[in-house]
Image: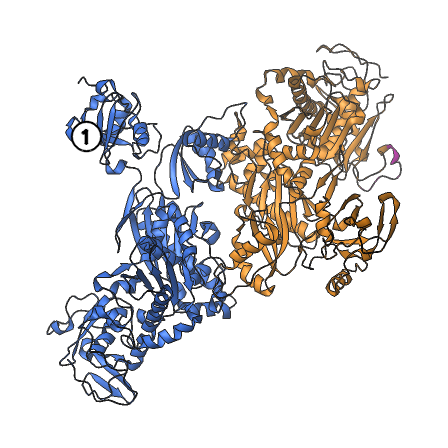
Chain colours: A orange, B blue
Amino acid sequence: MPPNHPTENQPPLVVFMPSGRRGRVQQGQSLLEAARGLGVEIESICAGRLTCGKCKVQIEAGRFEKHGITSHPDHLSPPTQEELDLLARMSADGCRLSCQAFVQGDVLVFVPEEARGQKQIVRKSATERAIPIDPAVRQVYVEVEQAALGEHRGDWGRLQDALAGQWHLHDLSIDLHALRRLQPALRKGKWRLTVTLWDEREVIEVHPGYREGVYGLAVDVGSTTLAAYLCDLRTGQVLATESAMNPQVKYGEDLMSRISYAMTHADGLKKMHDAIIDALNRLAAAAAKQAGLRARHIHEAVLVGNTTMTHILLGIDPSELGGAPFALARREALDIKARDLGLRLHPAANVHLLPSQAGHVGADNVGVLLAEEPYHQDEITLIADIGTNAEIVLGNREWLYSASSPTGPAFEGAQITFGMRAAPGAIERVRIDPQTLEARFRLIGEERWSDEWQGDPPAQLAAGICGSGIIEAVAEMYLRGVLRPDGRFDPGLQHPRVRWNGRKPAYVIATADQTTTREPILVTQDDVRNIQLAKAALYAGAKLLMNRAGVTQIDRILLAGAFGSYIDPQYAMILGLIPDCDLEKVYAVGNAAGDGARIALLNRGKRGEARRIARRVTYIETAVDPDFQEEFVAALHIPHARDAFPHLDGLLPAPRPVPSRGRRRRRQLN
Amino acid sequence: MPPNHPTENQPPLVVFMPSGRRGRVQQGQSLLEAARGLGVEIESICAGRLTCGKCKVQIEAGRFEKHGITSHPDHLSPPTQEELDLLARMSADGCRLSCQAFVQGDVLVFVPEEARGQKQIVRKSATERAIPIDPAVRQVYVEVEQAALGEHRGDWGRLQDALAGQWHLHDLSIDLHALRRLQPALRKGKWRLTVTLWDEREVIEVHPGYREGVYGLAVDVGSTTLAAYLCDLRTGQVLATESAMNPQVKYGEDLMSRISYAMTHADGLKKMHDAIIDALNRLAAAAAKQAGLRARHIHEAVLVGNTTMTHILLGIDPSELGGAPFALARREALDIKARDLGLRLHPAANVHLLPSQAGHVGADNVGVLLAEEPYHQDEITLIADIGTNAEIVLGNREWLYSASSPTGPAFEGAQITFGMRAAPGAIERVRIDPQTLEARFRLIGEERWSDEWQGDPPAQLAAGICGSGIIEAVAEMYLRGVLRPDGRFDPGLQHPRVRWNGRKPAYVIATADQTTTREPILVTQDDVRNIQLAKAALYAGAKLLMNRAGVTQIDRILLAGAFGSYIDPQYAMILGLIPDCDLEKVYAVGNAAGDGARIALLNRGKRGEARRIARRVTYIETAVDPDFQEEFVAALHIPHARDAFPHLDGLLPAPRPVPSRGRRRRRQLN
């Protein structure tokens, strides 16, 4: 077959790899056009102006039986010197630019990863899936008609015409920041410009000539912790992760105390607003620095947070969230200039705030939904995002219920006698020997269990007990009979580990020689009580949603949030924190709220999805639900007064009647 | 005919005065609904909630033959106690609220001026006409559904629903400022709210309950003078007028020197931008104070200015306007938050900047067009807005041409030996006796001519000569033969008033005893030269437009700007500043640019008109027009080297050949 001629007088056949898409295309069409015609996305910013080099491809030579094609680089128009020069500068000799290579015969084209359009990030979580990169901020390269006497459009008018003609972008506005830079940029770039667009509707930046780089920041504004992810908006890559304490903690540990601070101090709102804005500015600067950038390179930020956090962040008094009917100022998503909030990002940067669902289920929970997409699953999924408040979602592709439960800060180590945050030195794992009732534990930052320390104690001794530690401690105390199912210490128990201070018993987890303070670390009856209250709130919330949905069994449980990542699902279930479920199907999904923010940052279509989902979820107000109290009381028991846990079969003590309030003899340990 | 019954079993007849609109309406309809059905606009803000009292009307009693109606107040539903109370509070006893009065029989209704919708301002200018009041900012009163448990719209969602249901307002956004005030306002107002809207698309303010008042500021940002008009946006009334010097004057008297300042000083743009923003803030505060308000009550501002002024105002480097091709950064109108410019008006106020036409014809000229509407006239109108630059428009309803001519600051008293601004003590009128060649003059702030001062000189003696004075001086010097048509002093003239300082002759307008400095005030050969250059620039620009349009005669001439208001049309024509025209049809129209800004402030439809007109005008670039130079040279002569002035018949000396350069004997004065 002579080269440079179509197969059997048919139009040339082009096959794109690795997708395998193939088709006959018009003689003389560029490979870029051919690809688009065949639905193969190839990156291109400069639209064929030999500037960006994004569209480079490799042309294979030889007979490819599987594809029924004999391909050769000569079946394309020969490269010009300019193309060769650009490829050489890119160290891509041997490649072709698909915008410059015109089809003259059959070719098999390999599109390298970096040239593929529709880039994706893979979300690794309970459900692995790919999210196409389609951010709200993108760049285009244009050539603008020069200003000339007798033609009065103005530079912005000329740029608008160029964007319409070369990119089919119409009805754009331009931020004052970009307008101020437009004239010098056009002249410095010799009427060639890289334009940064927001949401296909506003020009937010102009650079002379060709210049790449768009960045975004996703932030989870937690009551306690701020977590920021700086992303390259072209690739989706996370360039830097930064976290910091929410400085509002000094105005109140939990949401109610911050609301109360706003209500009781004339400048309370302002102080908390200024504090969070200042913290976000520091976080953005630190993340940018980590990536070798400046905060002003951040072209957009997507924020999530619970409703109190987002109200304060916007400078809106959260008082209404402190009492029924828990009215939000605004439920809808919001786009606002960063500068209007005092955020020092790019001067024209947008801040997108995901929508809320109801007074106590905020944008963070919408983020969790975006990240986990229970609404795309057949399985009935329970998601619990456990912080000072727990937001619970139950649903599948057909229905979705959500609720908020006031778990309180016990799981974060607060209101626990020796409670502390999850930090080095915190007890995070606890085991109690069924025979001896002796405890052993493991610390964050130390590989060995405490019973392996003999003669070689770790540099950092036990400093306290964190959320996952207290859960294991209470669950083990129950399993080994130290606690009765109602959460009270077995009154008949006599053991050196159990201290009876009158009616205030306590169990010694760490002995004095194992701690930094040389005082033992105890779990008191009050601590157990606080954990019971917290776990019952979560369980009752979940149960309420199950009742509403009319389901008795859950297929999957996702534990979100930092706390959720540390706890052992088995202990969570033994404690009765979560309903019965196949333990294999209980997943820790980490900061799903932050992941959701990142997803909305990288894919603007997901913002529409968030809007639809936020309105679709049926929110159940636990605080006023007549069944909640009953469910709550039943859930105070360990694991539960009524509910069975078939998936813990063999792990739990044999079922017994609910114990009476009177004292009982200590049950024999297994 | 029994009262309370429709005429001859027909539905009731309602006649609204003074419009005379009439029609039969449904029994039981409110007068307000009836009015709307008949196309009679009656004001109403509270939509029938007995709050605003705007819709009060008078019901006539008796037989009105002309209207074929027997009217009586009893033909309406009787007033409730609440209606009577509100009318009493408004001192409107005897009136009815049209929203509360339901038609039961024939009535003739008088709608008082204050209750009429579609209020108008009357523009008194060359063409008197009425401009309907339809500002971009308006208020509506709504009742919002209370927040309730189990309903999660959020307050903004509830307000949106109320605005949609009660006012058919959809797709609104809300400024953060208003969002921050929404929750307390709703509760303080018991879920009744006055909402301030911008452009039917954004909520910019919320007030608890019923509260009226929207204000706007129109500002003409001149190179030399800033003029601000504070308007009540409900009535169109100008509540305060304030003017101030443009503080940029210290960086350069004329546009070119300011452009040059921006080009040659790194912080030049910033300094000039900051200066104008600061000045506008002072102006707004002063105007508001004059009206008993604060600047934060100003809900919108409309600004006009020449292109250099608007660029600097926006913080855009004006350098490109300093040289061909005189490229604008942006020609289109602009809406921008006042806060983004550093303007301290209402926190959510919008600033609207009218569009420009071309590099040297700015928003101020578009303002002039809006104010004078030559595009709605049959007569061919020449409009000259004379400042440091002169913008000239020629046209009628079929075509429009514009040009800019660099007249320089001579007309403002600069570059004139004894020149000064139009201020008390300035010579504004000059007469030279044809027989004696003695001069007399009149000062600003003094009624009497100088020859009437004998024995009783005014408190303020002559301090200098302003623009209108120098025009009259030069014209009179020409008329009386002191100057030849080429502008040179008649070389043969010997007179005490004429001082020959070698080749630098001068004429004494005010003698030493008539001046503050005790030195005589002279008009020198250089002064005459500068006036010739300025007037020739204007005339040549006008002539160029006439040539382009193919017209030889102008029907009307409008002189805009402060200078235009002071000059005597006859002297302007004798000098050859303006082309020949019926002197009765030469009008001074004052600050037409500022009036245009006010019109766009009060009627948002006019902004669309401005946009269309700005694009329709054909701009002629005088600087590069090959004919300009020739026209300019011919126009240097007084009044002109070629053109005839039939309307000055008998006023000018007989036509003579252009004098040679050689010395001539002094011509006999008439």
Work out which quarter of the rendered image holds the C terminus of chain B and state it: bottom left
Q: How many marks?
A: 1
Determine the chain carrying the residue at label 1.
B
| In this view, A205 is above or below B152 | below
- Note whether B323 is above or below B339 in the view shown: below
Q: Which residues are magenta?
A: A451-459
- Any part of residue A465 in sight: no
Q: Nearer the viewer, residue B478 or B593?
A: B478
Task: Residue B243: name its quadrant.
Answer: bottom left
**Magenta: main secondary structure:** loop
- Tell me residue A546's x, y (percent): 68, 19
> In the rendered view of the protein, which quadrant contains the N terminus of chain B?
top left
* Front-lying residue, B498 or B451: B498
Left or right of residue A272: residue A470 = right
Q: Could you say which quadrant of the image residue A494 lies in?
A: top right
> In the image as oriented, which residue stretches furthest toward the left?
B455
Q: Which residue is mark 1?
A: B67
